[in-house]
Amino acid sequence: MLYRLYDLTISSEKLLPWVPLSAGTEADVRIRFNRSPRSPHLSPEWFMKWELPGKDPWLHLGRIDGGYLLRFADFADFFVSSGGSEVEFIPLQPVPEETIQHLLLDQVIPLVINLRGGEALHASAVLAHGGVVAFAGPAGSGKSTLAGSLVKLGYPFFSDDCLRLKEEGGNIYAIPAYPGFRLWEDAEKFLFGKDGNPRLVAHYTSKLRVSVERRPDAYCEEPEALLRLYDIIHSPETQEESRIVIKKLSPREGFMALVRCTFRLDITDRKMLTRQFNFLKEVASKISVRQLSFPRNFDVLSSVCDFILEDCGGNASNRASNYINGVPRSSPLPSAGEGEGEGGLRKCTV
Amino acid sequence: MVRKINSQSVVVVTKDQVSADLSGEAAILNLKSGIYYGLDNVGARIWSLVQEPRAVNEVRDAILQEYDVEPDQCETDLLALLEELLSKGLIEVKE
């Protein structure tokens, strides 16, 4: 089967139920699935590893004859050929289908995009006010929940956790992914209740995958200009935050925020690093990056959405809640004009 | 700390980096380590001056002309920044 994922045509022996079919005839990336589990006999030259918060290994990246090996914990390998045109799944032990699909779509393909000369951000996005509004930030900062909140308000979903970017004609465009996103159970229940029809993302997490394709116009299928990137700050300090704060970042600060959320496979590849540096410089010069912090409370989400929508240049949603934490708001949200507030710092007290 | 740079030193950016001017500020990537750095406006101006081999006192004089700062303070801050850039592998001292 041929699928369209970002700007890639992908051939896969297995069904990828969340991914739109492609009208193309030639695959950019061929995916093969090794059926039988086997013990790791390959000897890659490991050059990068990511650990889970408890220090357990999560992802190792290594060089191997003909390409790269991506090892997820102790259960799955993906071989990616040097040019990023071949991907092979190699189970190290029996792996459920949903886990294979998740690793492939959400972890491996973003790195393949980078290997093939493209750039992608670890960000979730919706379409609002004529452009793509994206949310970046560390794991658990609320990227998908915020995107989901805007989808609930009627703004078309664009992508979850991976935002493919491209420069064309001097503008920065985002390319949509596939109509599904991943939420923790409490966020999924809060946002979609019984409408979500969620399924488990993978065997090692309780996150749920929610489809948006059943809702009319709920999913954006064409590339759109990138309008804004919000870098969500999430730390023990901001966890206690009682305000919604949007701070306009300087191009340098915005660049650094972009650096933090960009996918890169081989960090020793100077050609790739230089290419990506120049690309991010263009993005930082053309796109306004904001820092966003907000109280960790579902009841505040609609107010956060209103504030973001105002900041993006449109009017606040008619559906704006007059309540935050159950307390009526005594005054409207501050105006979101450029340059307001001290030093570009814009605050909304709740 | 033993200073490796003095006011007579000639310094220049290394070849192991790429940098960008971002509205008067600067971003730098050390290609050897893969680490990114940012410089504010004054740091970015110094960075632009050392794109070619230049004596530290020459850089100091240029900054003194452009910014309202005491000469001693300027030299102290300049040397501290250059030492840091040197330690990060972003500039080198020419013999």
Image (tube, coloured by chain):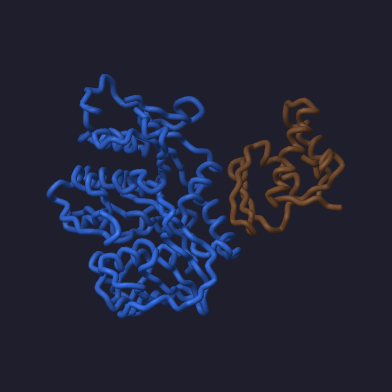
Chain colours: A blue, B brown
Instruction: Locate residue A256, reporting x and y percent.
Output: 53, 46
Q: Nearer the viewer, residue A335 or A83?
A: A83
Residue at the extreme left of the image, as rendered: A194
Q: Residue at x 36, y 28 (%)?
A: A243
The quarter of the picture where the N terminus of chain A appears is bottom left
Q: Nearer the viewer, residue A31 or A46?
A: A46
Residue at the extreme top of the image, as rendered: A330
Q: Residue at x 53, y 39 (%)?
A: A250
- A224 vs A287, left or right, is left
Instruction: Locate residue B78, reporting x and y percent.
Output: 75, 37
Q: Residue at x 36, y 39 (%)?
A: A312
How many numbered marks appear? Answer: 0
Rendered image quadrant of residue B83: top right
Instruction: Locate residue B32, reporting x and y percent.
Output: 64, 59
Above or below: residue B43 compared with residue A204: above
Instruction: Locate residue A142, reporting x and y percent.
Output: 33, 44
Above or below: residue B20 compared with residue A179: above
Asked if one can make out residue A285 in the rendered structure from this viewpoint, the answer is: no
The quarter of the picture where the C terminus of chain A appears is top left
- A37 vs A328, left or right, is right
Asked if one can make out residue B61 in the rendered structure from this viewpoint, the answer is: yes
Q: Nearer the viewer, residue A13 or A165?
A: A13
